[in-house]
C-alpha cells in the first residue's frame, strides 16, 4: 500500500483520523493493485480485408470478461493497444516500430491478416515476443524455423486440403484443374494440395492463375474443357471470377447454390457481438465470421498467461518483469500456449507443433432449404466418417468429368441459401465457397456444401 500510494502527501495523522484515511485508501487504490499487461494488436479496419471491424469488438468482449474474472490472472489486467494495419505490410512495419519502441512494453503481439502476420512473426523473435494471430490462414506461417513464436486461432488454409482429397477419392474424381489468385497464401495452399493429390494418384490437368483480371484464366479453363475446378482467391476476385463464368460461359437465367466454409459459434456470443456492433449489418461488417477466432485468441492468451504464474514464481520471475530481453518468461508463455486446450466459441482450441489451430472438418450439404451433416474428417488420423446421405442433381458424381467448381474464397460473409447466379456479381461474396457444376459449361446447376470446424 505504501509503494502504491507513495505520492500521497505525508503529514501527522491523529488516532481518530486514521480509520478514515485507511477507508479512503481502500476505496481509491484497488485499481492500482492490479498490474497491467499490454497486448500490442493490429486490427485491419480498412484495406483488402477489413477484419478488425468485427474482430476488435470481439476481442474487447473477451478482455472485459477476462479482466472481471477472479480465477484468471487475478492480480493482472490485460489492456489492448491497437492500430489499424489496413492489411498492408508497409503500414504494419511503421506500426510495429511504434508498438515496440513506445512505452509500455507489450507482452504479446496480435496481428490479423496473413501478410501482416508474416512481417510481425518474422520480426518478433528479435524481441522475444509471442505472436498470436486471429485471422491468418497462410500455410507459410506454419514454418517453425521461420516463425518460432507464432500461434494462430485461425486454421491454416491447408486445413481442408486432406478433406478435399478424401472427397475426390470418394467420388472417384481422377482429374482436376485449378485457378488461383497470385498471392502467397493461395500459392502455398495450392502447392500443398498438388502434393496431396499427386500422392493420391489424382492428376492436375490445368493450372491457371491471375493477378486482378480472371478473364483469360477462365477462358483457358473452358478451352481445356476443365470439369473439376479448384479455385482459390479473395472475395473481391471471387466476384470477378463468377461474373466471368456467368457472362462468358453461362446463361444468366440459371440458378446456383453455393458451398460455404464457416465457423460454428454460439448464439449467445453472436447476440452479444451484434449488440457490441450497434446493430450493424453483419454482411457489411468486415471480419464478422472471424470474430469468434479473435474472441478465442484473447482467451487462449489469458489462460496461457495464467498458467505461467506458478512456474515463473518458482524461478523468481513475475509476468510484470517481462522485457524484450527476458527469454525465460517468453519460454514459459510459449510452453503454456503450446499446451492450450479449451472449448472456445469457435470450437475446441488446441495448437499443433507449428502453432496452427487443429480441428475436425464438418461437411454439410444444403438439402431442401436446410443444412444436413453428411460427414466428418479427422485430419490428425486421416479418418473420413461418411453418413451416406449426400444428394446430387444431374449427372452422377462418380464421373471424373462431371463439371465442378471447388472454390476457396477467403474471408467470410453471409450464409445465403439460394440466389440467382446473375446476382453473384453484385452480391458481397466472402468466405469459403465450393460450386458443384453438373451437365456442361452452358447449363449450370450447382450443389451447395460447406465445411466448418467441428
Image: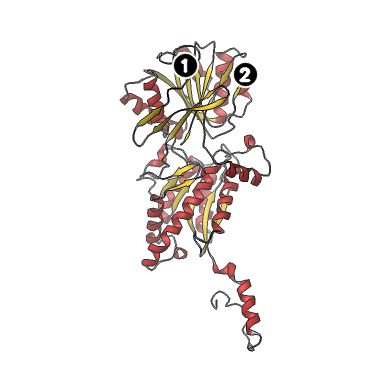
- Between 454 and 58, the one nearer to me in the picture: 454
At label 2, counting other C-alpha atoms closer than 10 Å, the crowd grade (few under 14, some 14-19, many 20 or more) is some
At mark 2, the secondary structure is helix
Q: Is residue 174 visible?
A: yes
- Residue drawn at (55%, 17%), measured in percent from left and top? 245
Q: Quadrant of residue 411?
A: top right
Above or below: residue 252 compared with residue 143: above
- Between 445 and 92, the one nearer to me in the picture: 445
According to the picture, the residue beneath numbered tag 2 turns out to be 422
- Report x, y in % for residue 247: 59, 15
- Residue drawn at (35%, 25%), measured in percent from left and top? 197
Left or right of 372, for residue 307: left
Above or below: residue 282 compared with residue 231: below
- Earlier in the chain: of badge 2 and badge 1, it is 1
At mark 1, the secondary structure is helix
- Residue drawn at (60%, 28%), measured in percent from left and top? 416
- Inter-mark Cα distance, 2 to 1: 20 Å
Q: Is residue 211 visible?
A: no
- Report x, y in % for residue 152: 45, 44
Snapshot colouring: secondary structure
- Report x, y in % for residue 120: 46, 48
Residue 321 is labelled as: none
- Between 183 and 419, the one nearer to me in the picture: 419
- Between 307 and 373, the one nearer to me in the picture: 373
- Report x, y in % for residue 259: 52, 26
At label 1, counting other C-alpha atoms closer than 10 Å, the crowd grade (few under 14, some 14-19, many 20 or more) is some
Q: Quadrant of residue 314?
A: bottom left
According to the picture, the residue beneath numbered tag 1 turns out to be 221
The label nearer to you, 2 versus 1, is: 2
* Residue lying at the far right of the rendered structure: 279
The reply to whether dot 2 and dot 1 touch (C-beta < 8 Å) is no
Amino acid at each position: 500500500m505504501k509503494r502504491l500510494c507513495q505520492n500521497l502527501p505525508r503529514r501527522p495523522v491523529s488516532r481518530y483520523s486514521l480509520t478514515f484515511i485507511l477507508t479512503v485508501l481502500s476505496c481509491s487504490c484497488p485499481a492500482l493493485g492490479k498490474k497491467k499487461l499490454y497486448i500490442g494488436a493490429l486490427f485491419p479496419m480498412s484495406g483488402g480485408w477489413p477484419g478488425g471491424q468485427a474482430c476488435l469488438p470481439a476481442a474487447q468482449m473477451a478482455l472485459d470478461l477476462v479482466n472481471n474474472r477472479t480465477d484468471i490472472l487475478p492480480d493482472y489486467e490485460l489492456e489492448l493497444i491497437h492500430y489499424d494495419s489496413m492489411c498492408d505490410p508497409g503500414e504494419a512495419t511503421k506500426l510495429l516500430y511504434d508498438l515496440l519502441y513506445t512505452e509500455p512494453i507489450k507482452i504479446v503481439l496480435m496481428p490479423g491478416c496473413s501478410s501482416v502476420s508474416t512481417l510481425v512473426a518474422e520480426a518478433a523473435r528479435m524481441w522475444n515476443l509471442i505472436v498470436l494471430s486471429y485471422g491468418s490462414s497462410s500455410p507459410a506461417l506454419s514454418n517453425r524455423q521461420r516463425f518460432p513464436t507464432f500461434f494462430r486461432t485461425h486454421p491454416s488454409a491447408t486445413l481442408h486440403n486432406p478433406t478435399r482429397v478424401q472427397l475426390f477419392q470418394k467420388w472417384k474424381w481422377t482429374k482436376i484443374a485449378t485457378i488461383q489468385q497470385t498471392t502467397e497464401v493461395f500459392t502455398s495452399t495450392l502447392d500443398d494440395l498438388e502434393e496431396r493429390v499427386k500422392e493420391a494418384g489424382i492428376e492436375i490437368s490445368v493450372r491457371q492463375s491471375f493477378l486482378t483480371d480472371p478473364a483469360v484464366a477462365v477462358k483457358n479453363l473452358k478451352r481445356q474443357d476443365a470439369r473439376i475446378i479448384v479455385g482459390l482467391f479473395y472475395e473481391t476476385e471471387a466476384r470477378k471470377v463468377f461474373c466471368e463464368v456467368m457472362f462468358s460461359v453461362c446463361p444468366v437465367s440459371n440458378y446456383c447454390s453455393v458451398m460455404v466454409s464457416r465457423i460454428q459459434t454460439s448464439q449467445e456470443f453472436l447476440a452479444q457481438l451484434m449488440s457490441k456492433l450497434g446493430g450493424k449489418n453483419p454482411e457489411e461488417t468486415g471480419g464478422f465470421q472471424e470474430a469468434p477466432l479473435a474472441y478465442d485468441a484473447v482467451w487462449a492468451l489469458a489462460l496461457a498467461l495464467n498458467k505461467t504464474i506458478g512456474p515463473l514464481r518458482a524461478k523468481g520471475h513475475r509476468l510484470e518483469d517481462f522485457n524484450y530481453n527476458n527469454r525465460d518468461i517468453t519460454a514459459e508463455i510459449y510452453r503454456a500456449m503450446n499446451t492450450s486446450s479449451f472449448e472456445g466459441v469457435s470450437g475446441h482450441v488446441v495448437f499443433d507443433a507449428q502453432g496452427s489451430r487443429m480441428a475436425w472438418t464438418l461437411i454439410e450439404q444444403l438439402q431442401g432449404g436446410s443444412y444436413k451433416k453428411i460427414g466428418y474428417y479427422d485430419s490428425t488420423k486421416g479418418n473420413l466418417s461418411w453418413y451416406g446421405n449426400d444428394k446430387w442433381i444431374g449427372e452422377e458424381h462418380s464421373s471424373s468429368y462431371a463439371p465442378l467448381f471447388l472454390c476457396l474464397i477467403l474471408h467470410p460473409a453471409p450464409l445465403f441459401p439460394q440466389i440467382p447466379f446473375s446476382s453473384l456479381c453484385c452480391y458481397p461474396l466472402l468466405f469459403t465457397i465450393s460450386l458443384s457444376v453438373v451437365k456442361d459449361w452452358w447449363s449450370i446447376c450447382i450443389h451447395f456444401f460447406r465445411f466448418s470446424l467441428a
